[in-house]
Amino acid sequence: MNIARDALGIGLRRPHVDALLSEHAPIGFLEVIAENHLDAGSLPRARLDEIAARYPVVGHGVALNLVGAEPLDLVHLERVRELVRAYGMPWFSDHLCWSASGGHRHHDLLPAPYDPELVPYVAARARFVQDFLGVPFGIENLSSYVAWGRDQMPEWEFYRQVVDASDCWYMLDLNNIYVSSVNHGFDPLAYLASVRWDRVLQVHMAGHLVRPDGLRHDTHDRPVCAEVWALYREAWALGGPFPTLLEWDDQVPPLPEVLAEVAKAASVRT
Amino acid sequence: MTSLPPPPPWLAPLQEAFGALLETPLDATGGTLRSSADAPALTAALADPSTARTRLALYHEQYWMRLYGALHAELPRFAQVVGYWRFNALATLHLHEAPPNRVDLARCGDGLAARLLAGIDRIASTAPPPATPDTRAIGPLVHGPDPWTDTLRSVRAPVDLARQALRMDEAARRALAAPHAAVWRPTGADVATLPERRLRFAPSFRLLREDWALAERAVPSDPPAPFSRHAEPWFWVSFRAERTTALARVEPGFARLLALASERPFGEAIDALAQGRDPTDTAALGAALPGWIERALTSGWWIGAR
């Protein structure tokens, strides 16, 4: 199934599966968290079979450990490739972060220094992943709460260098750009100005929490805020069309509410 | 893979220091779970050490809350029975012994039910200690001589309630992971030889006894409510249906048949069920039996005989 360049999608979440199967939701595509289906047993995979028969699906990962010091997990990659092939996923994405160390999985998206020494290391790993999977590999920017003394360039410069050197793609998360811009005090429009829009596979949108101390926390538990929609308008003007996906992972509301939220994108960009 | 470059030498130590911070149990002494760990090497590596404590604490607390949330979802009834505070203490013990090493977050609960059942069995077979430990101190408990039993002993709920909740939660986990078994339609030859054969049960099948109203509490009640005790035990079958997992209530007699049929040939199971009944009861059993058999077959609980 094809995904239109201006398609709107949502992340597939368990509370919505029955609703998505009982009617044909007006949605351009669904994004599947790979790790929810690789190791979870028979039933989640059986439901995914039904979903994929009705909707185009793309794959998204949270465990690749792209910027980790440990070797890439080939067993994991093999299973991701099987998933990508089984459902004809046109692309796969994961994050510009690390998520494991010392043999343990941290189940978080953790930042590494924006150090030029890391660029060839990460780019080689990303290129390997793309070649291994056999589909375009999108690298997603993350929300972060700390910056490192080793940082020698802005995040967007590091990101662009990795994308360029790996011949991979951007999975551009606009909420993450905004969250990090507030947390670290940079201009999100400068970030957008650095993006190679011809290399953008897809855009992510999500809601985040504003803590009492002003720190922005990437929680995916609420609607997208006005500032992030404004950033989306700028992004669309600079590089649209691109497939747009809403992530809602916690305090997940009923499907119609999630669909209404992502539908706002169509009005914002006109 | 051999062509991939090695990481810069500073990367692994940085990530291991960060990982060590994340895996340090949260401080519970203030009555809430908070990050209070010092990470001087990590702090020194940050661009702005003045904000390090607050910002590293966000990662630290997020790590534990995400894992606690995942484990609550895996064992929802047991978490309600013991209370979230004690559950988090027990989850901390589990994660300390078995740090997550699978990509699927839900799999961090693998082995937790077995650890809990072993702990429950230990406290059920020994006398209670003279004093209740302070379960607010999760960190120190991790390093205590027998933290599992110390924490479980502090639970006020009956041991059998905790055990039944755990078994029901674990049965649901098993049903989610198990393959769907095709409905078995015995042939004439199967029926003729069934009394001498033992039935094969679906991998997802679990027969559960319920003395308190647990089945309905897969989703936590809000506000938290006590578990009401039934006047007589209820029985449930947890299993994997084609498109969902399910809990189906069964009559006590049917439950007894299912239990007997799991351990002996079907004919012996029926004989054992009929033993000691008066004629009225025997007639009632005879009337109920065809319906029970049909239900077990159409529900996919019996998948063959050997």
Image: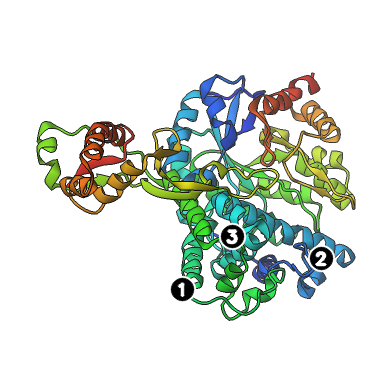
**Numbered disc in front, either 3 or 2:** 3
How far is mark 3 from mark 1, CA to CA? 16 Å
Image quadrant assignment for residue A225: top right
SS label for mark 1: loop
The amino acid at mark 1 is: Ser
In depth, the one of B97 and A247 nearer the eye is: B97
How far is mark 2 from mark 1, CA to CA? 51 Å
How far is mark 3 from mark 2, CA to CA? 46 Å
Q: Which residue is mark 1?
A: B125
Residue contact at pointers 2 and 1, CB within 8 angstroms: no
In depth, the one of B94 and A265 nearer the eye is: B94
Image quadrant assignment for residue B15: bottom right
Image quadrant assignment for residue A222: top right
The amino acid at mark 3 is: Ala
Say yes or no: labels 3 and 2 on the same chain.
yes
Within-10-Å neighbours for mark 2: few <14, some 14–19, many 20+ = some
For residue A2, say whether it is visible: yes
Q: Which residue is mark 3?
A: B157
SS label for mark 3: loop
Say yes or no: labels 3 and 1 on the same chain.
yes
In depth, the one of A97 and A205 nearer the eye is: A205
Q: Earlier in the sequence, mark 3 or mark 2?
A: 2
Q: Which residue is mark 2?
A: B46
Q: Indicate which disc residue B143 carries.
A: none
